[in-house]
């Protein structure tokens, strides 16, 4: 198992809903917990993954996600069992959409 941490500053969109979980930890999938948190305007992401050694790919996917949503004061926890970057992006977008009350 590997734990990766990312922090993105200067977000503009704040989420106010209750914490939400999307996805299911299982073979080739992941779960995402997203919640509002007082982080001085930052978005903090912690990833626990069974796929060791993919830090640069995770960083690229997280940067792309942050550029799409520009979240502020948001904590995201990801438990991964080897999901592909496309599945990671899908689940993270679902988590934000759930917090915003948008249809999936």
Image (spheres, rainbow, N blue to C red):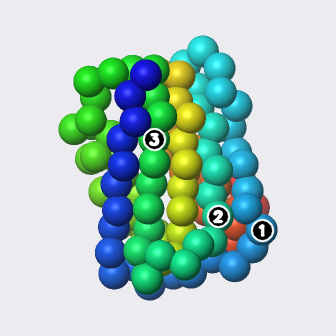
Would you place residue 10 above or below residue 7 in this image? below
Sequence order check, earlier mark of 1 and 3: 1
Residue drawn at point x = 59 percent, y = 72 percent: 37
Element under disc 1? loop
Given residues 42 and 27, the one toward you in this image is: 42
Quarter of the rendering containing residue 102? bottom right
Q: Which mark is residue 18?
A: 1
Quarter of the rendering containing residue 101? bottom right
Location of residue 23 in the rendering, given as x and y in whole percent from the top left corner: 68, 37
- How far apart marks 1 and 3 lie (CA) works out to 20 Å
Would you place residue 76 above or below residue 66 in this image? above
Residue drawn at point x = 32 percent, y = 75 percent: 9
Left or right position of 92 against 104:
left
- How far apart marks 1 and 2 lie (CA) works out to 7 Å
Q: Which mark is residue 35?
A: 2
Residue 3 visible in rendering = yes
Location of residue 19 in the rendering, given as x and y in whole percent from the top left corner: 73, 62
Sequence order check, earlier mark of 1 and 2: 1
Given residues 32 and 92, the one toward you in this image is: 32
Which residue carries the number 3 mark?
A: 47
């Amino acid at each position: 198992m590997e734990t990766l941490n990312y922090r993105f500053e200067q977000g503009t969109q704040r989420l106010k809903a209750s914490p939400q979980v999307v996805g299911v930890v299982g073979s080739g999938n992941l779960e995402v917990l997203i919640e509002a948190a007082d982080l001085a305007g930052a978005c903090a992401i912690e990833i626990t993954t069974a796929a060791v050694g993919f830090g640069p790919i995770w960083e690229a996917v997280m940067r792309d996600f942050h550029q799409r949503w520009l979240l502020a004061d948001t904590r995201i926890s990801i438990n991964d069992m080897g999901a592909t970057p496309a599945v990671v992006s899908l689940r993270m977008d679902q988590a934000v959409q759930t917090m915003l009350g948008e249809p999936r």
